[in-house]
Amino acid sequence: MYSCNGLGLMDFTVPSLSELVKLSLECSWSDSLVELQTLTRLMYFAYVSHAYEIVTTCSKRILESDRSSVHNRDTKKYDVPGNRLKQEMLSTTAWMQGQSIMEKLCGRKHLRVAASIAFAQSARHAGEAGNYSLVMFAARHFWNACLPLLGSPHDREHLKEPTEIILKSIIKAESKNKQEEKAMWPLHQWITKDFQSIGC
């Protein structure tokens, strides 16, 4: 309903975004991918509305859930398209987190470093997904965030590890793209693959 509002179609009466986020965070989700998609979409609406506190709340929950699922051996294993979708949403989450930090920067250098790290994590998840264009999108934002810091050797030291993550992610995404080009796509995945290539 949030997606439909403002498109010139029928507008829906919806609860406030903060109320929806609160309800979503209180839910007990049986499928972590549905939870991730819901919180990512709510985070996007918050980002567009410049509700940076909600963006921070959602991104913190999403990235914490991802870290705990990595350590939890009983985590549901998704097939390749499901895992790719998960990594792309995590990349988008980290990007929105970094961009929100950049938009409320107010000249604070430590926030610029934090945004750079978020963009590097966005690139890392995009690399895991094999989404080269998403990696390069995150890399551009990383470069713009860290450019003013390059004059100081001390600041450059903070950027060494994120830069390595960006470079490894570019290589990983490119190699995954080459593997996918060689692979035959089953008939039921053709529409998805065509749709993804149009959206890039």
Image (cartoon, grey):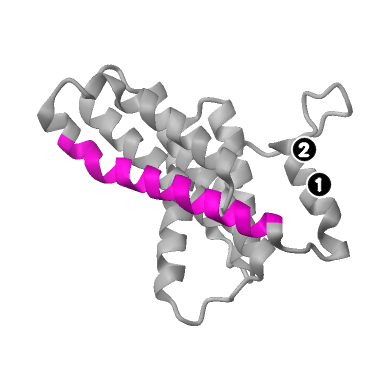
Q: Separation of disc 1 and disc 2 at Cα?
A: 6 Å
**Residue 99 in view, yes or no:** no
* Quadrant holding the N terminus: top right
Q: In this view, does 21 lie to the left or right of 70?
A: right
Q: Residue at x 49, y 46 (%)?
A: 58
Give, as a single range, the part of the protein colored magenta. Answer: 157-181
Q: Is residue 138 above or below residue 130?
A: above
Majority SS type along the magenta span: helix
Rendered image quadrant of residue 107: top left
Q: Residue 31 carries which label?
A: none
User: Which mark, residue 194?
Assistant: 1
Q: Where is residue 104 in the image (x, y as percent from the top left)?
A: 37, 23
- Amino acid type for the residue under numbered disc 1: Asp
- Image quadrant in which the C terminus is located: top right
Pointer 2: residues within 10 angstroms few (<14), some, or many (20+)? few
The kind of residue tagged 2 is Ile
Horizontal and vertical percent position of residue 8? 86, 21
Residue drawn at point x = 57 percent, y = 53 percent: 130
Tag 1 near tag 2, CB within 8 Å: yes
Asked if residue 133 is positioned above or below residue 63 in the image, the reply reads: above
Q: For the point 58% across and 27% down, which residue is it? A: 48
Residue 198: image tag = 2
Closer to us: 113 or 150: 150
Q: Nearer the viewer, residue 28 or 48?
A: 48
Q: Does the magenta stretch include residue 159?
A: yes
Q: Residue furthest bottom?
A: 74
